[in-house]
């Protein structure tokens, strides 16, 4: 990969934006708190007391850089919203009725009576009166807009909110907030009425990241910064939730490879190790009982890693 030099790697590793990051995180927390509070006035099953703001990317482990994306799960504990998401609106009953009708009609010699067009073409939708996650995301967008300056914009991207606020957060700050449901440590993403919810739990991640840091020290955080920067430059996507994957890679890397004071040499050793390893068999930092190839939360990153390692093949220690 052209442009990767000792000087660049060292500058990424030594970059310190902790004060800016801390101030930004406090603003994001305040914004979410105000938005949920405003929403609680009109939605009885949403409250600040039953809401948790969980950092997902660099904010989670202190490896924030000037190019970092501030990605959060806004977990709301609400059994009622979960029930509303899973409502079938009598879809199964209508399916059975149509099946029975078609079956009986097929056995009759007389011509079947044509159904009304409206009945046949009626789309299957959520009850408009039910308050589900789609409505929650939409309402949070409005509530957040009320608590930002006129120069800020909150985009509704479907499953998440993207906040752009030059005056409120700075011109290069990228903020992504995923409103999800929360229950007993699980952040629950609604997929469909058929598949239900996809769950992510950070309990293992928090413990394993802390354990790795205790064993290898600050070089772990420096390598996180470097890998974050390289991953970001290897993807065209404006949002890449890569941190879980990167942490899994570095957690599975032997502790002895982090030893030393020359971060560039450490970087070379770790890249070589990853290049000659079957990383798909590494343990997931979310769930050490499964491998990365079975970890749904990181599948999109596997191709990016291959591209990244291929581009780094020509780099040699200087």
Image (cartoon, rainbow, N blue to C red):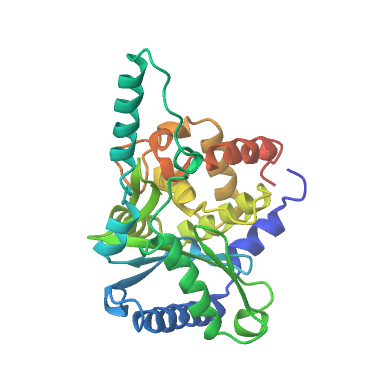
Identify the residue at horizontal 60%, vertical 84% (top origin): 168
Asked whether, in this view, residue 317 is left or right of residue 181, the answer is right
Location of residue 155 by image quarter:
bottom right
Residue 117 relative to residue 185: left or right: right
Q: Is residue 309 left or right of residue 46?
A: right
Q: Nearer the viewer, residue 59 or 260?
A: 59
Total of numbered circles in the picture? 0
Looking at the image, residue 116 lies above or below residue 113 = below
Residue sitting at 57 percent across and 73 percent down?
Answer: 16
Quadrant of the frame with the N terminus: top right
Q: Is residue 52 above or below residue 3?
A: below
Q: Residue furthest right?
A: 2
- 247 or 84, which is in the foreground? 84
Q: Is residue 253 visible?
A: no
- Residue 203: x and y, percent? 28, 57
Residue 225 in view (yes/no):
yes
Q: Splitting the image into 4 quarters, where does residue 272 fall?
A: top right
Residue drawn at point x = 41 percent, y = 23 percent = 112
- Extreme residue toward the front, this view: 110
**Depth check, front residue: 94 or 50:** 94
Quadrant in the rendering for residue 215: bottom left
Q: Position of residue 311 (x, y in %)?
A: 69, 39
From the viewer's side, name the closer residue of 91 and 210. 91
């Amino acid at each position: 990969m052209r442009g990767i030099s000792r000087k660049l790697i060292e500058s990424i590793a030594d970059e310190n934006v902790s004060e800016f990051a801390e101030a930004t995180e406090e603003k994001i927390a305040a914004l979410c708190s105000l938005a949920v509070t405003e929403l609680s006035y009109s939605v009885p099953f949403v409250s600040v007391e039953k809401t948790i703001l969980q950092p997902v990317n660099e904010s989670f482990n202190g490896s924030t850089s000037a190019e970092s994306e501030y990605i959060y799960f806004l977990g709301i504990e609400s059994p009622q919203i979960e029930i509303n998401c899973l409502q079938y609106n009598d879809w199964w009953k209508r399916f059975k009725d149509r099946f029975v009708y078609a079956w009986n009609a097929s056995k009759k010699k007389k011509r079947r009576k044509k159904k009304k067009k409206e009945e046949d073409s009626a789309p299957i939708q959520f009850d408009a009166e039910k308050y589900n996650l789609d409505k929650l995301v939409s309402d949070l967008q409005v509530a957040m807009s009320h608590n930002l300056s006129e120069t800020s914009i909150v985009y509704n991207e479907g499953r998440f909110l993207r906040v752009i606020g030059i005056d409120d957060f700075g011109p290069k700050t990228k903020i992504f907030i995923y409103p999800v449901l929360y229950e007993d440590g699980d952040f629950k993403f609604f997929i469909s009425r058929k598949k239900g919810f996809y769950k992510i739990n950070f309990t293992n991640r928090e413990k394993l990241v802390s354990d790795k840091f205790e064993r290898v020290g600050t070089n772990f955080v420096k390598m996180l910064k470097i890998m974050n920067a390289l991953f970001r430059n290897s993807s065209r996507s404006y949002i890449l939730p890569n941190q879980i994957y990167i942490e899994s890679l570095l957690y599975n890397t032997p502790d002895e490879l982090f030893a030393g004071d020359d971060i560039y040499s450490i970087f070379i050793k770790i890249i070589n190790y990853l290049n000659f390893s079957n990383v798909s068999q590494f343990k997931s930092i979310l769930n050490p009982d499964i491998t990365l190839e079975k970890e749904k939360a990181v599948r999109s990153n596997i191709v990016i890693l291959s591209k990244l390692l291929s581009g780094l093949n020509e780099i040699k220690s200087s």
